[in-house]
Amino acid sequence: MTNFIDYVKIYCRSGKGGAGCMHLHRAKYLPKGGPDGGDGGKGGSIILRGNRNLWTLLHLKYQKHIIATDGGKGGQSRSFGKDGEDKIIEVPCGTVVYDGETGEFICEVKEHNESVILLKGGRGGLGNWHFRTATNQAPRYAQPGEPAQERTVIMQLKVLADVGLVGFPNAGKSTLLSVVSAAKPEIADYPFTTLTPQLGIVSYRDGRSFCMADIPGIIEGASEGKGLGLRFLRHIERNAVLLFMVPSTSEDVKAEYNILLNELEQYNPELLTKARILAISKTDIQPAESNLQQIDYAQLSEEIGIPVLPISAVAGTGIEALKDALWTELNKEQNQIIEISHAPIDITAIERSEPTIREENEDEQQTIYLNEVEEDWDLDKYKGIGWDE
């Protein structure tokens, strides 16, 4: 089970306002003291707050209900009711919130200590002291508090990075990230070694640096749910530059690049407006008669309209030239402001793809492990075998 959780669905409810008090003052020498009912307290709000020390939504994975406290009732002698306690939800920077029923975008938290009121607590009701007039000197009514607000929300984490790595499995993305930064992603000679996004800080000249994100590999048909699907592409929506990586062992570099480009377009057409660089990786392992000798980088760059650079993360060749190209793109004026429009999400599709990768034949008998708590199991189908006795 992974500790990187970038999707949670929770139920939130703010506190309702306390009712105002209806009270008429009575004392030994003041039998008709008039109204003195106090106001009710304000209900607690649900507040999101960015925290740069968090990098995942794991702390919210099993916290399915977040409820703020209600405001207290007003009292006599114009005593105010106690305000409800706000519930502050700490989230990593880059968290986007959607409505859990409609999929509509609600808000996003991008900065450290940035606070967003997700659900506002109800206002407390006014006591009858507020309603006294010359013609109504003893009002026998008070105002009720405002009701609570409730909402089911979906939180998605979209990591904040300057450069996003895009490529097929085993294109050398993790190797490159481990070479240019201090990140230690898993590296192996089989596909899908990277199952969660990895971040690394790339050092540049004169103490400057930028952040690079390694996204799990995409395959042809990912937009249809093949492989790991496109669920991790949300993490490159805020990247200023997309670094495409295609190995030099590929039979057709241009064709693989176009496949990757098409999968990105299926996910979000806005991704195609970002600056792109193509890196031809693994140039150190090619024999003399291989496809490497046939690649014309200048011609390929002219055909696809973006810079093309040969690199070898293992041998260290082309790395500095790649950093220079990335830094140049990052500092271009059109790439400085990274604003994306959060389109509504398809609730049914995302809930189908988020919890688990389903098998083709769902009717086949499955093995149940008692320590596997990642999924919400349907226990009804196991009744009659001792669990409900």
Image (cartoon, rainbow, N blue to C red):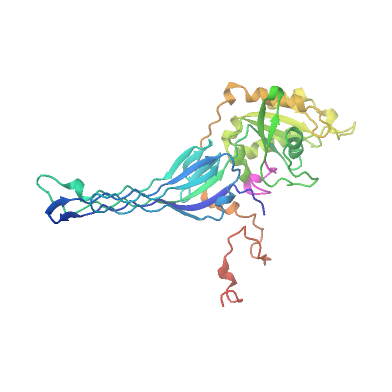
Which quarter of the rendered picture does the C terminus lie within? bottom right
- In the image, the segment drawn in magenta is 215-230
* Any part of residue 313 in sight: yes
The x and y percentages for residue 275 are 63, 28
Residue 124 to residue 359: above or below: above
Please tell me which residue is depicted at 54% across the width and 42% down the height of the picture.
95
Please tell me which residue is depicted at 51% across the width and 48% down the height of the picture.
154
The x and y percentages for residue 267 are 59, 41
Residue 178 to residue 317: above or below: below
In reply to whether residue 228 is colored magenta, the answer given is: yes
As drawn, is 227 to the left or to the right of 110?
Answer: right
Which quarter of the rendered picture does the N terminus lie within? bottom right
As drawn, is 158 to the left or to the right of 149?
Answer: right
User: In the figure, residue 388 lies in which quadrant?
Assistant: bottom right
Residue 379 to residue 92: above or below: below
In reply to whether residue 225 is colored magenta, the answer given is: yes
Please tell me which residue is depicted at 77% across the width and 31% down the height of the picture.
280
